[in-house]
Image (spheres, helix red, strand yellow):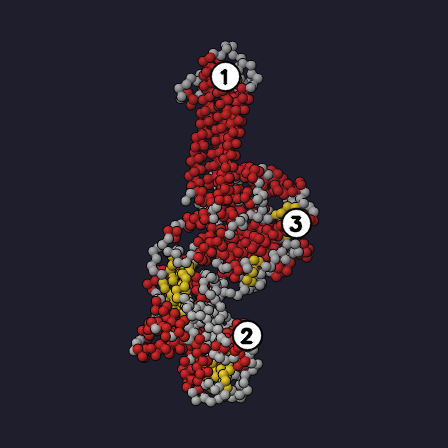
Amino acid sequence: MTLTNPIKVAVVGHTNAGKTSLLRTLLRDEAFGEVSNHAGTTRHVEAASLLLDGKPAIDFVDTPGFEDSIGLLTTLEELQKTEGIDRLESLRAICQIAHLYPDFDQEIKVIRQLLSNELFFYVVDVREPVLGKYINELDILAYAARPVIPVLNFTASASAQTKIWKEHLAQLNFHTQVVFDTVAFKADDEKRLLKQMQTILSDRYELLESIIDQHEQQRSELVESACLMISELMVDAGGLYIDCANNTASIDAAQSALQEKIRDADTRCMQSVLQLYRFQLASISSTELSIDQGEWKLDLFDDSNIQRFGIAVGSGAAKGALLGAGFDLFTAGMSLGAGTATGALAGALLQTGQRYRHELNARIKGYRSVCASEPTLRVLLLRQLDLLNKLQRRGHAATDALSVESLSGEDLPKEFQDWIKQLHGNPQWSRLSKRFDSQDESRNHFVTEVADKLKQKLK
Amino acid sequence: MTFRDRQIAELVKARYNNGLIDIFTAISSENSKLIDTPSESPEAKSSKEARIIKACNRFHDDSSEEIINSTTRKISVLSTLFLVLMFSLGTLAALQSFAQPSISGVNVFWLLLLLLGPNLLMLIIWVAMMLFNHNPSSSSSLTSLPGYIIRQFVAAIYGTKNDQKALQINILKTLYKPLHGRWLFSLISHLGWAGFMLGGLACVLLILLARQVNFVWETTLLDADAFTHLTLMLSYLPSLTGLDMPNATTVAQSRLGAPEGQLADVRTQWATFLILCIVVYGLLPRLLLAGVSYHLYRSRREAFRLDLSEPFYQQLIRHLDPPSRQAGILDPDALPPTSPSSDLVGPLAAQGPEAADWIGFELDNSSDWPPVAIKQGKVLHLVNDRQTQQQLFDLLKSYEGHALVIATSLLRTPDRGIERFLRQIQKSSSQTVVWIGLSASSADMANHPERLDDWIQLSARCHIPSHQIFVIDKDQNR
């Protein structure tokens, strides 16, 4: 596809309304600009491009916020009167004599952008009441005689006055307003914003349609990749066995080794999912999910963790045996029936016998194996799924910690129990294991199947 | 892009999966340094796979090169050892036949059976395997038998104890990917058996050159005609060379215990028959099949493509194809930040002045005005826009009160517009003490801890000290 020139959009608004935040979310770039709760955080004009097939499709310009629209509007009106010029000319005039107005240094930077871009996003913090200074900002924008899309930010906040703002904007003839919370991201809002751009910039319809398509494709690819990663993690953790001699010291050592391997894999998976969604590891923190600086802080093998995630463990005996340890211990080979053992002997030379060979060996030599318990694997999966759910709705402007709703076993696919059985029976599927067999095609089928089910379970 | 490039990509993937390199962080930091690169770069036009390979190549260093080379070396050494072993086995098989305790000569059919029999059997097994193994994704036991044998063999030699070895095995796995790996396995197997036949042939030739051997045959159960037919059938292809082959009479004369002694011509015919049988039925088919396998291995290997649906590659593409690119600062901030006088910053007033007139400024709700905190004094004006601001300034021109409270919301961001407003009030009523009352609920205070400090800083810039700022409890107005 041949791209035309990129669309030039200036993002303007009152100081602290969330202009840089909007761009961070639209660009999926947490590192863009600087964000804080203080006024005048962005003091320069900064640009970034949204790419389509690697080429700029929309050139965005982030501007300093309007801080004194009342004073600026008065000055512009005076210029119009004294110089006998129209509104648009007054914008050009003030840029030429900017040195005479040091108090409006930031606003003049915005005006320069008003004169050189084809569309403006006017970002509104809907937690604010509709004040005269905001109306005056819209008056100044109207001077530039370019289309404006009011973007209503922070609509998910409890103190949002979205309805009042919508009514006021409609009274001022701004009917193309779009709700777009930069923190609580909704893909539909973003699509609506692009659709509004299509309505206004009809000659850019095709380009914007391609961007909408690319966003949808990327979203589905992201979910697919993330589910695959989580599925792989479950297969790696569920299929991992560590052998040890039949005494307490060896079992303890094996248990520690098992926990360390699973913890590492769990953290790596979380980090990969964060990177996939382009969130910086250090900026994500969560009290409930216990992520800090790209590390899980809540231990997977901690009793309270399992309870926190609302995992019900069957019987009292099982609870005692499984919760504390977070791992299963079994005498290797005991889980095999006589029939399978015979089959294993017969198949030991062929690949089908491989999964039993080790157990047979263990039975003969009398050692034991440890593996992750079902509740542990439940927590592992629930935690990753919850993180994924949250990332899908997290704007790149969000700076707050991730929160977590109560989770329950119902959030897992009904096939979970069967998966665990299959995983415990296929230690060669675990990449963490020495027995890993990358040529085992059934592993890939299993991973894909699990990923598909996980995708369906996502909220 | 060659197979080797893809092999490097697979190696980088393996190193990442083993936690040995962090390719994504490196690419992210490269991307962030990449400001406004030309959009028409050829890289943007190339395929996803090509870009992945190019990126992976950047992470290919001497140590990973050594992993590939040493793995390839080990494969060559192992293959050579296998060929030598097979050659020796062929020699031994031939020697074994010549060492039979037969008084009158060498049993020609026994010799052929020892040399061609195992070869034929393994050839049948190979054909069966290739037929069953037609679909590489099927998971029957036979499917991955070659892969299994190779893995066990390799694991026994390399072990899987450290990462380097795990990576070497990964490289082997890329070599033995089902689509092309079966042909590499076939190639090695055919060459091995060609070596076996060559060993047998060399041994036979050497013995026939150095010794005079009578060729005989014998049977207990079979009819003598069966051997005649077998010989004539077997000699059909070798006879196409134009050399003399044993005929029905020669065959009959060569039976063990036949009265006539063997003539030199007959011996030569049998020797030619034997040598040509080994070449035509043993050596040549194996060499031919090795050639075909080599060709198919090469072509299938070149057809090998990375599985871009794998999470690693998906992630890599996301990093190589960022959704956006920063273009830097267009209009920098040239003004230095202003800092207020520090002696104006201190503790806040516990409450507002006893007697003062009140101005409401940009309040959150109409219910916040007038505030119940007003003790003595009057409500002067409510300012929300340019017009009401102007009205207030006009009013202040003739104002003579001693104290003014500007009641506003703590939640307003203290901006330059507010600063200008406060300065103007200070200027218009120079004899009046200006207070700031910040209307806030306890939730507002908790949720916006930084805002109070912003107000103190702004007030200080307007020469209003902290002890003239107080908080109005918004909840009291409700």
Residue at image point 50% right, 59% down: A280
Find residue B176 and report its horizontal and vertical position in percent.
49, 40
Find residue A341 and report its horizontal and vertical position in percent.
63, 41
The reply to whether dot 3 and dot 1 touch (C-beta < 8 Å) is no
Residue B445 has which mark?
A: 2
Label 1 marks which chain's residue? B
Q: Nearer the viewer, residue B108 or B212?
A: B212
Q: Which residue reaches farthest top?
A: B260
Callout 2: few (<14), some (14-19), or many (20+) C-alpha neighbours within 10 Å?
A: some
Q: Is residue B411 above or below residue A394?
A: below
Find residue A180 and report its horizontal and vertical position in percent.
45, 67
**Tag 3 residue:** A253
Q: Is residue A352 visible?
A: yes
Residue B210 has which mark?
A: 1
In the image, is A279 to the left or to the right of A373? left
Amino acid type, mark 2: Met
